[in-house]
Amino acid sequence: MPKQRSLYVCNQCGAESPQFFGKCPSCGAWNSMVEQIVTATPAGRVTPLAAARSASSSRTPKPAPQPIAALTLSQISDHPQTRLASGYTELDRVLGGGIVPGSLVLIGGDPGIGKSTLLLQVANQLATRYRILYVCAEESGQQVKLRSQRLGIGGIGGGDRGGGEDGGDEGDRDGKRSKVNRRNKNVQPSDSLSPSPPSPPSPSPPSPLSPSPASTLYLLPETDLETILRELEALRPQVAVIDSIQALYFAALNSAPGSVAQVRECTSALMQVAKREHIALFIVGHVTKEGAIAGPKVLEHLVDTVLYFEGDRFASHRLLRSVKNRFGATHELGVFEMADGGLEEVRNPSELFLGNRDEETPGTATIVACEGTRPLVVELQALVSPTSYPSPRRSTTGIEYNRLLQILAVLEKRVGIPLSKLDAYVAASGGLNVAEPAADLGVALAVAASFRDRVVDPSMVLIGEVGLGGQVRPVSQMELRLKEAAKLGFKRAIVPASQAITSSELEIIPVARVMDAIAIGLMGGRTNNHES
């Protein structure tokens, strides 16, 4: 009988230790060491990848492997790889132009935010052109069917397992897979999973982004890793969805599903199959209460792209943000709105983050922030009021707290606005988190306008970073920001003096110091008389 021993694994970074530590010696996280019982690997143990290869070779004889030799960079073909269009412009933007075959995309988000809804709608769109496998490890097939009906996804299922755009030898593989299909009863076309409610619900109107394709969308309600790998080898879909990685388990490991060892082993095996068979793989990941993706950090290292699906569950809009992308720009942003028929794209996100420009409110300023390569016009609101506490309160929503403290100190020291005994609240509208320094000038002007109870010109945008000496510093992508402001009808823009470019659509006002920006921004501004 193989020996067992205890091993302590950090659930933040995956570091292993034979003894327990309250603080991980590798990443410094507290209370992250979890005990796992490790069994010595017996001779001849089959890994998930070896099992998949063995099953594949028993079904489809392959030629002897060719020797692999190192190539110079010039010897590698520079033929561009064709990306798959997801049917959602916002998702394609975040992915860098579409889905790359053979890539692994990890998507995380809070429970109930819409991760499964988004991927089911994407799978439905892709099923019109490709063969799709949806592994629903957390739901039964009937539950997924009910969700598809609620989203207005109908008429899917019932097709054979062949087809797809790539054609070629796909038809030849169908005959070889037919025996496997009869053996594996877990995979079912989605229209065969018809629930039997007492009274059938009236069908929802189909979403404009969710047509009814012919059935190449297959559901696999399974949590066993080896079964999933065998089905990936048999079906060979162009795109597969794993919902979720924390629900999968490999029977040869003694740890529970979702543990560090299980997540690492399952992801590694899925990566090997996806790269070898050129399957684009979407993986859903749980998040911790701090908002980070649960499991070892190696999970984010193994995949090609890491996306976060964010938003307030009680609000309608959702933000899809890229934090890692080997095939495109990071920090790209996609905007969706949760409607009755599922998620819909927001074509002009700037309108979502703008308030009512006809309403004149003191302490309101407009900035142009950039998320990746996308400019977004965002309204900032500030409120300054006398405090009733020994220490004044500072609160932010969507703005970095430390940057607010820095700007308040600059306003008091360089501009002469006494804020040390006043409460200060700053918020970005629409639930967007603005982390870049280009918002500094807008925050400063909004706070000054609230203090003086003045209205900032609603046709003006502010772009610039504020230094500790009160200077207005340049920011990146200025032309892109100004074009977005002009497109939405703004007339004036206060920018750093070193970036005073000419524009035929906007009046460009260059400033060198934050004091000058406040003087110009509040010049001619009206006082809020209806409170006097």
Image (spheres, rainbow, N blue to C red):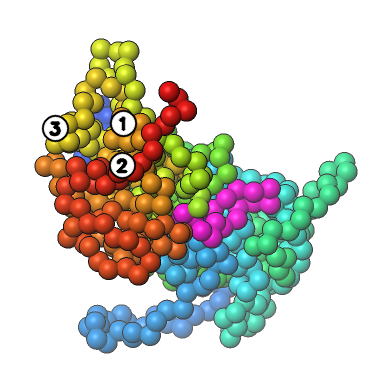
Between marks 2 and 3 in the image, the one whose residue lies nearer the viewer: 2
Q: Residue at x 39, y 81 (%)?
A: 80
- Residue 25 in the image, given as x and y percentages of width and height: 20, 36
Q: Is 27 located above or below residue 193 in the figure?
A: above
Instruction: Give the labeled residue for mark 3.
Output: 413
Between the residue at mark 2 and the residue at mark 3, the CA separation in whole angstroms equals: 19 Å
- Residue 165 in the image, given as x and y percentages of width and height: 60, 79
Q: Quadrant of residue 379?
A: top left
Between the residue at mark 1 and the residue at mark 3, the CA separation in whole angstroms equals: 17 Å
Labels 2 and 3: the sequence-earlier one:
3
Asked if residue 27 shows in the view, the reply is yes
Labels 1 and 3: the sequence-earlier one:
3
Badge 1 element:
helix
Badge 3 element:
helix
Q: Residue at x 62, y 65 (%)?
A: 125
Q: Quadrant of residue 496?
A: bottom left
Is the C-beta separation of discs 1 and 3 under 8 Å? no
Q: Which mark is residue 522?
A: 2
Magenta span contains residue 520: no
Is the C-beta separation of discs 1 and 2 under 8 Å? yes
Q: Residue at x 54, y 56 (%)?
A: 346
Magenta span contains residue 337: yes
Instruction: Give the labeled residue for mark 1.
Output: 452
Q: Quadrant of the C terminus?
A: top left
Q: Please, what is the three-letter code of the amino acid marked with disc 2?
A: Leu
Segment colored magenta: 332-350
Give the number of callouts: 3
Q: Please, what is the three-letter code of the amino acid marked with disc 1?
A: Arg
Asked if residue 18 shows in the view, the reply is no
